Amino acid sequence: MKGIIFYYSNSGNTKLACQYIVKNIKNIEIDLFDMVKDDIPDLNDYNIVGFAAFADIWGPSKLVQTFIEKLPQQDNKFAFVFNTYGFISGKTLKILDKWVTAKDFEVIAGHSLHTPESYPPMIASGKGYKQAPSKKEMNEFNNFVFELNRFFYLLNKGKEIQKKNISIGLLNSLLPMIPRAIARKNMGEKYIDEALCTECGTCEKICPYKAIKLNPKPIFDMNKCYGCWACYNHCPNKAIYTKKYRGIGHYPKPNSQLKEKLKV
Protein backbone atom coordinates (compact mmCIF):
# COMPACT_ATOMS: atom_id res chain seq x y z
CA MET A 1 0.00 0.00 0.00
CA LYS A 2 1.25 3.47 -0.86
CA GLY A 3 0.35 7.11 -0.27
CA ILE A 4 1.44 10.58 -1.38
CA ILE A 5 1.28 14.04 0.16
CA PHE A 6 1.02 17.01 -2.18
CA TYR A 7 2.38 20.02 -0.30
CA TYR A 8 2.99 23.72 -0.85
CA SER A 9 5.50 25.31 1.52
CA ASN A 10 7.08 28.75 1.14
CA SER A 11 9.00 28.95 4.40
CA GLY A 12 9.54 25.23 4.90
CA ASN A 13 7.21 24.93 7.91
CA THR A 14 4.60 22.91 6.02
CA LYS A 15 7.20 20.69 4.36
CA LEU A 16 8.83 19.97 7.73
CA ALA A 17 5.44 19.04 9.23
CA CYS A 18 4.77 16.71 6.28
CA GLN A 19 8.16 15.06 6.77
CA TYR A 20 7.22 14.55 10.42
CA ILE A 21 3.97 12.85 9.35
CA VAL A 22 5.82 10.57 6.93
CA LYS A 23 8.39 9.63 9.57
CA ASN A 24 5.72 8.68 12.09
CA ILE A 25 3.42 6.72 9.78
CA LYS A 26 3.95 2.99 10.32
CA ASN A 27 1.53 1.20 8.03
CA ILE A 28 2.13 2.75 4.63
CA GLU A 29 4.91 4.13 2.42
CA ILE A 30 4.31 7.81 1.66
CA ASP A 31 5.92 9.99 -1.03
CA LEU A 32 6.17 13.78 -0.81
CA PHE A 33 5.45 15.95 -3.85
CA ASP A 34 5.93 19.71 -4.11
CA MET A 35 2.92 21.39 -5.75
CA VAL A 36 5.22 23.98 -7.35
CA LYS A 37 6.47 21.31 -9.75
CA ASP A 38 4.85 21.23 -13.18
CA ASP A 39 4.32 17.50 -13.58
CA ILE A 40 1.73 15.45 -11.69
CA PRO A 41 2.35 11.80 -10.77
CA ASP A 42 -0.12 9.07 -11.68
CA LEU A 43 -2.57 8.85 -8.78
CA ASN A 44 -3.43 5.27 -9.75
CA ASP A 45 -0.17 4.34 -8.03
CA TYR A 46 -1.48 5.53 -4.65
CA ASN A 47 -4.13 4.29 -2.25
CA ILE A 48 -4.44 7.55 -0.34
CA VAL A 49 -3.55 11.17 -1.12
CA GLY A 50 -2.74 13.97 1.33
CA PHE A 51 -3.01 17.69 0.60
CA ALA A 52 -0.96 20.09 2.72
CA ALA A 53 -0.68 23.88 2.57
CA PHE A 54 -0.15 26.91 4.77
CA ALA A 55 -2.81 29.45 5.70
CA ASP A 56 -2.21 32.28 3.23
CA ILE A 57 -4.28 35.06 4.83
CA TRP A 58 -7.03 32.76 6.16
CA GLY A 59 -7.17 30.43 3.17
CA PRO A 60 -5.05 28.25 0.86
CA SER A 61 -2.88 29.95 -1.74
CA LYS A 62 -4.02 30.43 -5.33
CA LEU A 63 -1.27 28.03 -6.39
CA VAL A 64 -2.88 25.26 -4.33
CA GLN A 65 -6.26 25.81 -5.96
CA THR A 66 -4.69 25.78 -9.44
CA PHE A 67 -2.82 22.55 -8.66
CA ILE A 68 -5.91 20.73 -7.37
CA GLU A 69 -7.96 21.88 -10.36
CA LYS A 70 -5.41 20.19 -12.65
CA LEU A 71 -5.94 16.81 -11.02
CA PRO A 72 -8.18 14.28 -12.79
CA GLN A 73 -11.54 13.38 -11.26
CA GLN A 74 -11.27 10.49 -8.84
CA ASP A 75 -13.53 7.61 -7.87
CA ASN A 76 -13.78 8.22 -4.11
CA LYS A 77 -10.06 7.73 -3.53
CA PHE A 78 -9.25 8.32 0.14
CA ALA A 79 -7.58 11.62 1.05
CA PHE A 80 -6.68 13.78 4.03
CA VAL A 81 -6.12 17.52 4.34
CA PHE A 82 -3.62 19.39 6.49
CA ASN A 83 -2.47 22.96 6.96
CA THR A 84 -0.05 25.02 9.01
CA TYR A 85 -0.74 28.55 10.20
CA GLY A 86 0.95 31.34 12.11
CA PHE A 87 -1.52 33.94 13.41
CA ILE A 88 -4.79 32.21 12.54
CA SER A 89 -5.88 29.34 10.30
CA GLY A 90 -9.16 30.78 9.07
CA LYS A 91 -11.08 28.60 6.61
CA THR A 92 -7.93 27.00 5.16
CA LEU A 93 -8.80 23.44 6.17
CA LYS A 94 -12.46 23.69 5.12
CA ILE A 95 -11.53 25.17 1.75
CA LEU A 96 -8.96 22.44 1.15
CA ASP A 97 -11.65 19.90 2.01
CA LYS A 98 -14.07 21.59 -0.43
CA TRP A 99 -11.57 21.68 -3.30
CA VAL A 100 -10.43 18.09 -2.75
CA THR A 101 -13.98 16.77 -2.36
CA ALA A 102 -14.95 18.50 -5.62
CA LYS A 103 -12.44 16.20 -7.32
CA ASP A 104 -14.32 13.20 -5.86
CA PHE A 105 -11.77 12.35 -3.19
CA GLU A 106 -13.20 10.98 0.06
CA VAL A 107 -11.64 12.98 2.89
CA ILE A 108 -11.11 10.87 6.01
CA ALA A 109 -9.05 13.22 8.22
CA GLY A 110 -7.89 16.81 8.60
CA HIS A 111 -5.79 18.93 10.93
CA SER A 112 -4.38 22.46 11.35
CA LEU A 113 -1.00 22.89 13.07
CA HIS A 114 0.12 26.14 14.69
CA THR A 115 3.68 27.01 13.63
CA PRO A 116 5.85 30.13 13.76
CA GLU A 117 4.56 32.97 11.58
CA SER A 118 6.21 33.42 8.17
CA TYR A 119 4.27 36.52 7.05
CA PRO A 120 6.68 39.49 7.40
CA PRO A 121 4.06 42.12 8.36
CA MET A 122 2.87 39.91 11.25
CA ILE A 123 6.43 39.20 12.39
CA ALA A 124 7.31 42.90 12.21
CA SER A 125 4.27 43.71 14.38
CA GLY A 126 5.52 41.37 17.11
CA LYS A 127 3.18 38.46 16.35
CA GLY A 128 5.77 35.91 15.23
CA TYR A 129 4.67 33.02 17.48
CA LYS A 130 8.30 31.91 17.60
CA GLN A 131 7.61 29.12 20.12
CA ALA A 132 4.66 27.53 18.31
CA PRO A 133 3.44 24.85 18.47
CA SER A 134 2.74 24.59 22.19
CA LYS A 135 2.88 21.28 24.04
CA LYS A 136 -0.90 20.97 23.72
CA GLU A 137 -0.76 21.72 20.00
CA MET A 138 1.98 19.11 19.50
CA ASN A 139 -0.12 16.55 21.37
CA GLU A 140 -3.06 17.32 19.10
CA PHE A 141 -0.82 16.98 16.05
CA ASN A 142 0.48 13.63 17.29
CA ASN A 143 -3.11 12.51 17.84
CA PHE A 144 -3.81 13.39 14.20
CA VAL A 145 -0.82 11.29 13.07
CA PHE A 146 -2.07 8.45 15.30
CA GLU A 147 -5.49 8.79 13.66
CA LEU A 148 -3.89 8.54 10.22
CA ASN A 149 -2.04 5.42 11.32
CA ARG A 150 -5.33 3.89 12.41
CA PHE A 151 -6.99 4.76 9.08
CA PHE A 152 -4.10 3.26 7.13
CA TYR A 153 -4.25 0.10 9.22
CA LEU A 154 -7.98 -0.28 8.53
CA LEU A 155 -7.44 0.45 4.85
CA ASN A 156 -4.72 -2.19 4.66
CA LYS A 157 -7.06 -4.70 6.29
CA GLY A 158 -9.88 -3.89 3.88
CA LYS A 159 -12.05 -2.47 6.66
CA GLU A 160 -14.69 0.17 6.07
CA ILE A 161 -13.57 3.80 6.54
CA GLN A 162 -16.08 6.61 6.86
CA LYS A 163 -15.77 10.16 5.51
CA LYS A 164 -14.83 12.68 8.19
CA ASN A 165 -16.67 15.95 8.73
CA ILE A 166 -13.93 18.58 8.80
CA SER A 167 -14.53 21.14 11.57
CA ILE A 168 -12.57 24.36 12.16
CA GLY A 169 -14.21 26.10 15.11
CA LEU A 170 -16.52 29.12 15.27
CA LEU A 171 -13.91 31.90 15.01
CA ASN A 172 -12.18 30.39 11.99
CA SER A 173 -15.51 29.71 10.30
CA LEU A 174 -16.47 33.39 10.57
CA LEU A 175 -13.30 34.68 8.90
CA PRO A 176 -13.49 35.20 5.12
CA MET A 177 -10.71 34.15 2.79
CA ILE A 178 -9.03 37.39 1.69
CA PRO A 179 -8.66 37.72 -2.12
CA ARG A 180 -5.06 37.53 -3.27
CA ALA A 181 -5.50 40.83 -5.10
CA ILE A 182 -5.91 42.49 -1.71
CA ALA A 183 -2.83 40.70 -0.35
CA ARG A 184 -0.84 41.87 -3.38
CA LYS A 185 -2.09 45.43 -2.85
CA ASN A 186 -1.20 45.31 0.84
CA MET A 187 2.31 44.20 -0.04
CA GLY A 188 2.61 47.00 -2.59
CA GLU A 189 5.40 47.63 -5.05
CA LYS A 190 8.66 45.78 -4.50
CA TYR A 191 12.00 47.49 -4.85
CA ILE A 192 15.64 46.44 -5.06
CA ASP A 193 18.51 47.83 -3.02
CA GLU A 194 21.07 47.64 -5.79
CA ALA A 195 23.93 47.98 -3.32
CA LEU A 196 22.82 44.74 -1.64
CA CYS A 197 21.61 42.77 -4.67
CA THR A 198 24.21 40.35 -6.04
CA GLU A 199 21.99 39.17 -8.95
CA CYS A 200 22.11 35.64 -7.49
CA GLY A 201 18.72 34.72 -8.96
CA THR A 202 17.29 33.31 -5.73
CA CYS A 203 14.14 35.42 -5.98
CA GLU A 204 13.51 34.32 -9.58
CA LYS A 205 13.95 30.65 -8.64
CA ILE A 206 11.84 30.82 -5.48
CA CYS A 207 8.85 32.71 -6.94
CA PRO A 208 6.04 30.14 -7.32
CA TYR A 209 4.11 32.38 -9.72
CA LYS A 210 7.01 33.09 -12.10
CA ALA A 211 6.56 36.81 -11.51
CA ILE A 212 10.28 37.68 -11.36
CA LYS A 213 12.90 37.91 -14.11
CA LEU A 214 16.54 38.96 -13.83
CA ASN A 215 17.70 41.66 -16.26
CA PRO A 216 20.29 41.66 -14.65
CA LYS A 217 18.56 42.90 -11.47
CA PRO A 218 15.13 41.46 -10.54
CA ILE A 219 12.12 42.82 -12.41
CA PHE A 220 8.72 42.20 -10.78
CA ASP A 221 5.60 41.50 -12.82
CA MET A 222 2.75 42.70 -10.59
CA ASN A 223 0.17 41.12 -12.87
CA LYS A 224 1.53 37.68 -11.92
CA CYS A 225 2.45 38.46 -8.31
CA TYR A 226 0.16 37.14 -5.56
CA GLY A 227 1.85 38.86 -2.63
CA CYS A 228 3.20 35.66 -1.06
CA TRP A 229 6.42 37.35 0.22
CA ALA A 230 8.59 34.39 -0.86
CA CYS A 231 11.06 36.67 -2.68
CA TYR A 232 11.27 39.01 0.32
CA ASN A 233 11.75 36.16 2.80
CA HIS A 234 14.34 34.25 0.81
CA CYS A 235 16.58 37.01 -0.54
CA PRO A 236 19.93 36.08 1.09
CA ASN A 237 21.02 39.73 1.30
CA LYS A 238 17.63 41.27 2.19
CA ALA A 239 17.88 43.40 -0.94
CA ILE A 240 14.13 43.25 -1.68
CA TYR A 241 11.92 45.71 0.17
CA THR A 242 8.57 47.50 0.04
CA LYS A 243 7.51 50.98 1.10
CA LYS A 244 6.52 49.69 4.56
CA TYR A 245 8.99 46.87 5.18
CA ARG A 246 12.72 46.88 4.72
CA GLY A 247 15.19 44.54 6.40
CA ILE A 248 12.67 43.29 8.99
CA GLY A 249 10.29 40.36 9.54
CA HIS A 250 12.09 37.78 7.42
CA TYR A 251 11.37 34.05 7.86
CA PRO A 252 13.26 32.08 5.17
CA LYS A 253 13.20 28.68 6.90
CA PRO A 254 11.85 26.86 9.98
CA ASN A 255 13.37 28.19 13.20
CA SER A 256 15.49 25.99 15.46
CA GLN A 257 12.82 25.22 18.04
CA LEU A 258 10.36 24.06 15.37
CA LYS A 259 13.04 21.84 13.86
CA GLU A 260 13.59 20.32 17.29
CA LYS A 261 9.88 19.67 17.87
CA LEU A 262 9.42 18.22 14.37
CA LYS A 263 12.74 16.44 14.28
CA VAL A 264 12.97 14.13 11.28
Image (tube, rainbow, N blue to C red):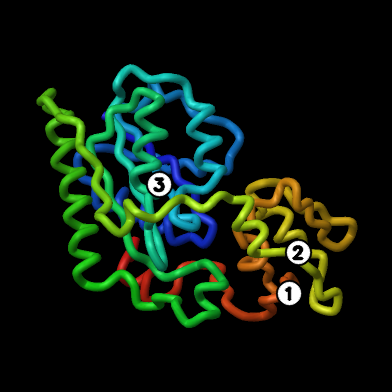
| Nearer to us in this view, 260 or 78 | 78
The residue that disc 2 covers is: 189
The residue that disc 1 covers is: 243
The nearer-to-camera label among 1 and 3 is 1
Question: Quick one: quadrant of the N terminus?
Answer: top left
Distance (Cα) linking label 2 and label 1:
7 Å
Q: Residue at x 40, y 61 (%)?
A: 85
Q: Secondary structure at mark 2?
A: loop
Q: Earlier in the sequence, mark 1 or mark 3?
A: 3
| Nearer to us in this view, 60 or 157 | 60
Looking at the rendering, which quadrant does residue 27 occupy?
top left
155 is higher (above) or lower (below) than 19: above
Graded by Cα atoms within 10 Å as few (under 14), some (14 to 19) or many (20 or more), the crowding at tag 3 reads many
- Tell me which amino acid carries mark 3: Ala
118 is higher (above) or lower (below) than 76: below
- Total labels drawn: 3
Which residue in the rendered view is the most extreme toward the front?
174
The residue that disc 3 covers is: 52
248 is higher (above) or lower (below) than 38: below
